[in-house]
C-alpha cells in the first residue's frame, strides 16, 4: 500500500472515531443552474453521470462536452447528524457518541419521524445521559 493509501486509511479512521462526517462534493460545469455543488453519495461515485442526470443535471449538456466533460470534486466536513438504525425490525435513535439506543420508533417525535423517513435531511445529533456528562 502506498503512503498516500495509508494516510487516507488513517485519516478516515480518525474522522470516524471522532464522529466527523466527510462528504465528497461535486460541481459540474454550470452546476449552479441545477442546484450544485452538492454531496455525491459514496455508492454513486462510480456512476457519476447517471447520478448527475437523476439529480436534474441535463444529459444533453453532458453530451455537448463529449470526452471533455469534467466535474470539480472536493471533500467537506458535513454537520454531524442524528443516527437512526433498525433494531429487530424497529427504528431506533442512537447516541451519536457511544451508539447506545436512546429511543425507539414508537417514541419518536414528529421531527424524528420525518428524519427517519427521509422527509428532512438533518436532525441534530443526540446523546445519552452518560455521553452528555463527558
Image: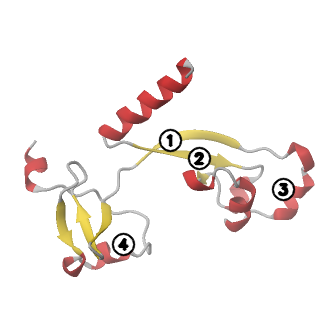
Residues 80 and 11: in front is: 11
Measure the alpha-carbon separation of dots 1 and 4.
Answer: 24 Å
Q: Which mark is residue 28?
A: none
Label 1 crowd bin: few (<14), some (14–19), many (20+), radius 10 Å: few
> Which residue is found at the position 44% from the left and 75% from the top?
119
Residues 30 and 92: in front is: 92
SS label for mark 2: strand
**Mark positioned earlier in the residue sequence (1 or 4):** 1
**Mark positioned earlier in the residue sequence (1 or 3):** 3
- Marks 2/4 in contact by CB < 8 Å: the verdict is no
The residue where tag 4 is placed is 116
Measure the alpha-carbon separation of dots 2 and 4.
Answer: 23 Å
> Which residue is found at the position 79% from the left and 44% from the top?
70
Label 4 crowd bin: few (<14), some (14–19), many (20+), radius 10 Å: many
Q: Position of residue 132 (x, y in %)?
A: 12, 49
The residue where tag 3 is placed is 62
Q: How many marks?
A: 4
- Marks 2/1 in contact by CB < 8 Å: the verdict is yes
Q: Is residue 118 above or below residue 101?
A: below
Q: Position of residue 98 (x, y in %)?
A: 20, 49
**Mark positioned earlier in the residue sequence (2 or 3):** 2
Q: Position of residue 122 (x, y in %)?
A: 39, 62
Amino acid at each position: 500500500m502506498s503512503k498516500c493509501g495509508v494516510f487516507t486509511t488513517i485519516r478516515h479512521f480518525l474522522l470516524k472515531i471522532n464522529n466527523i462526517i466527510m462528504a465528497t462534493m461535486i460541481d459540474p460545469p454550470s452546476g449552479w443552474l441545477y442546484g450544485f455543488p452538492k454531496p455525491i453519495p459514496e455508492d454513486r461515485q462510480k456512476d457519476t453521470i447517471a447520478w448527475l442526470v437523476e439529480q436534474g443535471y441535463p444529459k444533453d449538456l453532458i453530451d455537448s462536452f463529449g470526452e471533455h466533460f469534467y466535474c470539480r470534486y472536493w471533500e467537506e466536513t458535513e454537520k454531524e447528524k442524528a443516527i437512526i438504525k433498525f433494531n429487530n425490525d424497529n427504528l431506533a435513535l442512537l447516541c451519536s457518541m457511544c451508539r447506545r439506543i436512546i429511543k425507539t420508533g414508537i417514541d419518536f417525535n414528529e421531527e424524528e419521524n420525518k428524519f427517519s423517513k427521509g422527509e428532512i435531511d438533518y436532525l441534530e445529533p443526540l446523546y445519552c445521559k452518560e455521553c452528555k456528562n463527558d
